[in-house]
Image (cartoon, rainbow, N blue to C red):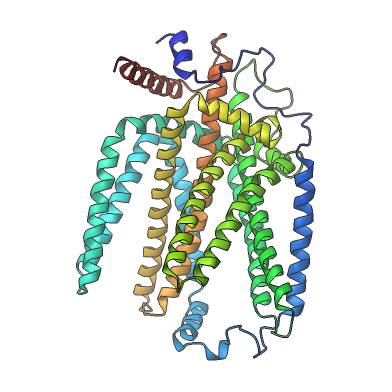
Amino acid sequence: MGKKEIKESLRGDDAPLEHDPSWAGVKVENRSFNDLFFLVLFVINLIAVCAVSWWSYGAGDPSSTNVACPDPNKADDYFGHAIIYLKTHSYLLGVASALAFGFGLVWLVLLRLFTKIAIYVTLAAAVAVVIGGGVFLVKSENADVRIGGYVLFGVAAVLVLIIIALHKKIALTAAVMAEACKALQHNPATIFVGFLVLGFIGAFLAMWIASLVYMNCIPSSADPKATRYAFLYLVFGGMWIVLYLIACLHCSIAGGVAVWYFSRGTNYVHEHVPMSPTLTALGWAFSSAAGSLAFGSLILAVIAFIRFLLYRAQKAAEGNKIASCILGCLRCCCACIFGIVQALNDFAYIYVAMYGTSFVESAKKVFNLIGRNPLQTVMVDSLTNVLLWFGRIIGTVLAVITVGAILQKDGALSAESSGVMSLAAVLAFIILSVFANIISCAVDTVYVCYCEDMERNQESGRYLMDADLHAQLQEAARAKQLSDNKQAKI
């Protein structure tokens, strides 16, 4: 397949990018500040959220009996025993966290060294976990539980059929993922940045949730209208801050991976390549790119807040089946819109990290780029997300099984241990989600860099991509061209 055919197969409604000898891949120096208006809005929102939280701490009174706060003295005996049990066995949460972190590192190394094998092992393990869960439930004496086991068998069968149908696409995903893991190997600070941002998010969530609890405990003598508006604003403002921090993480990973990708060729090495591209990109996220990230996260926060309002409205309309059904449908539509916008934002953040352009300009460029390569984008992104979800589930299950085995060995496995095991599952899932998000962002960034590399360097033929990655994506382009030819004949 020649260059002309490849170019035509990648061409869409917009013309491919032209060759530019001075193009350096990533703009490392002299990055301009964009979307300053949204940065100012974000800073105002951050100050306002802190002010409202401070007010709620002063106005709320959890110890008062005239408010709707739960009374710890009236707690059920089960929860009281569960708290005592948790204090005694809190070390198991550290064990689960360490296991999840270790599994994440091993997972990353396996994906780097044995990408295709690791993918198939992950998929096979996921099917085995589902079948094992089905076998466990089928042995239950409860008929309803046994039905759940048979449902899991059906799910396992569907997963096997999906794997068989997509076995050719797995090679494409393996090539992109191997390149992404190689980038992460050359940027070890990426893992540190991932958990650093997670720490920021965790600290803010602790303050935010405490503020909401205190606000819910404001005495009834206070102005209910003002309290309600303050509560709603605190929810929206907190959503925006969390989504902004997630955007900063995405920008940091994308910037680090893109700098590594484009600095490999002798003609494209930057004069001042950062010693730690990921940490440098984190600095961009909190400085020159902050306004663009605030703009993108604001869009997501608005959609998320609408979903929250629809949820409250549906809870209030539980007595009216028609209204509840309509609101439920609106929530589903809003969730779909949120997922689509989030996926598009993630790709736009890659361009923000690479070139330091505004959010709107970055979104427009990346939409045009991906629009010229829709088939490959869907295949790589979808299969990567499914694979990473399987990995998260497997790691979480292994952590919970280990905690349960330790409790059983110590003779401490009882009804109260469910609380410890649930918290262990949550912690393990969060830690593995950090690894999964890092890998997913790296895969998306490598794919965008490949598209840029392919279109800009076709004339010179000096590609920076890995040979295996190029071969797999060429095969995808050839398959798309054959499909288009068949449809044209029909």
Q: Residue at x 55, y 45 (%)?
A: 342
The structure residue drawn at horizontal position 39% and vertical position 11%, both measured from the top left corner, is 1
Q: Position of residue 440 (x, y in %)?
A: 50, 41
* Residue 5 quadrant: top left
Instruction: Name the residue at 73% across, 85% down.
Output: 221
Residue 180, given in percent of the width and then of the height, sits at 51, 34
Count the marks: how many?
0
The relative height of residue 174 versus residue 191 in the rendered view (above or below) is above
Picture coordinates of residue 234 (x, y %)?
69, 64
Question: Which image quadrant for residue 178?
Answer: top left
Classify 474 as above or below 50.
above
The reply, left or right, for residue 423 in relation to residue 387 is right
Residue 352 is situated, as x and y percent measured from the top left of the image, at: 67, 35
Image quarter hosting the C terminus = top left
Q: Is residue 278 above or below residue 6?
A: below
| Residue 106 versus residue 320 in the image, above or below | above
187 or 200: nearer the eye?
200
Residue 101 in sight in this render: no
Foreground of the two, 77 or 195: 77
